[in-house]
Image: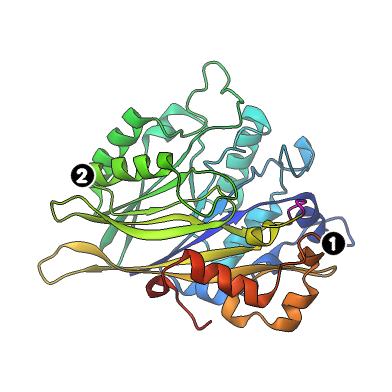
Amino acid sequence: MTLVMAGDVLMHDKVIRSGLQSDGSYDFDGLFSHVKTDIEAADIAIVNQETILGGEELIYSGYPSFNSPFEVGDAEASAGFDVILHGSNHALDRRAKGIENCLDFWDKAHPAMEVLGIHDSEKDREELCIMECSGIRIAVLNYTYGTNGIQMPKGKGYLVDYLDEKRVREDIAEAEKKADITIVCPHWGTEYRLEASKEQEKWAGIFLECGADLCIGTHPHVIEPIEVLKDGKGNEMPVYYSIGNFVNYTSGTGKGVMNRMVGGLAEVKIKRDKGGTVRVKEVKVRPVVCHLSENEISAYFLEDYTKEKADANLIRRQDPDFSLENCKKLVNEVWDKKYIGGVL
């Protein structure tokens, strides 16, 4: 079976406005239109929805306190995603009401969607996400390092899944009993840093020790290395420390801002061998770039992106270093070539 995961869908103000239609409605299908075929082709597709979908009632806004339209979720469902990760540092930007509105939307509009990282009850928090495909059971876990200092309301400690070691160990132990493969998707690391932090390395070691089979990280808003960890007992766990932004329109300016426009679609192959053991057989990443223009905000595979497009990308107003050549250079500097899919 194949699994893909897209990085941060970061709904800055200009991304929200890009979906506004003449009749006042919103349509965000264009964010994913150039990568949709590959997302739909995967057996399981995951995306990190960085910002809460609290709806119009809670007033739309971008950085620093985000709230996004429900129609973002409609576009993700239409693009072929099966799992939404909401465990991010922005999960409580609209407090408990934001989470409740978001979960109510998913439940009513797309009840088949697996929504992770946030909950509306302790009962929901206790239920792990176990999916089955081709006779293979996959557990997916999602945690965030924090919520920007916003505390969970009294009596609602179930709202957000945090990187709490005791809880993480318990969850992975349960997942290992119920599933063939355990995937951990942590929201962690240091923003805009192209290398993994000591904290990320510590947590990755914990995941491996507990028996997790794969780790795909988000939050730094730039790409970070991919490596395979080994514990000396024959166990291995591939780690994507960060697959970067998938969609964003940062307001940052200056050197390094171009890095925020480059991300990746993690591509994983999982197989049951002749002995019946299920393993992660291959990990790759397809580099993507977010294109910004007056009429379009959309993710493109870097292999399909042209020099003409790059030269016209509005991010050049904020960082003149942005170019097709420099996007490719960044990818080749951060990711080992053996993991890069597509032709650059």
Q: Depth check: 187 or 94 in front?
A: 187
**Residue shown at the point (80%, 60%) measured from the top left:** 18
Q: Position of residue 21 (x, y in %)?
A: 85, 61
Q: What amino acid is found at the position of numbered circle 2 in the picture?
A: Lys
Q: Depth check: 318 or 163 in front?
A: 318
Relative to residue 315, is residue 145 depicted above or below? above
Q: Can you say which quadrant of the picture contains the N terminus?
A: bottom left
| Horizontal arrangement in the rendering, residue 153 relative to residue 24 (left or right) | left
**Residue shown at the point (56%, 49%) measured from the top left:** 220
Secondary structure beneath label 1: loop
**Residue shown at the point (45%, 66%) measured from the top left:** 335
Q: Which mark is residue 204?
A: none
For disc 1, the neighbor class at 10 Å (few under 14, some 14 to 19, many from 20) is few
Q: Which mark is residue 177?
A: 2
Q: What amino acid is found at the position of numbered circle 1 in the picture?
A: Gln
The boundaries of the magenta stretch are: 249-253
Residue 260 magenta-highlighted: no
Image label count? 2
Q: Depth check: 327 or 207 in front?
A: 327
Magenta segment, prevailing SS (helix, strand or loop) = loop
**Residue shown at the point (66%, 35%) measured from the top left:** 98
Q: Position of residue 297 (x, y in %)?
A: 74, 66
Q: Position of residue 286 (x, y in %)?
A: 50, 72
Q: Position of residue 228 (x, y in %)?
A: 30, 59
Name the residue beneath numbered marker 1: 21
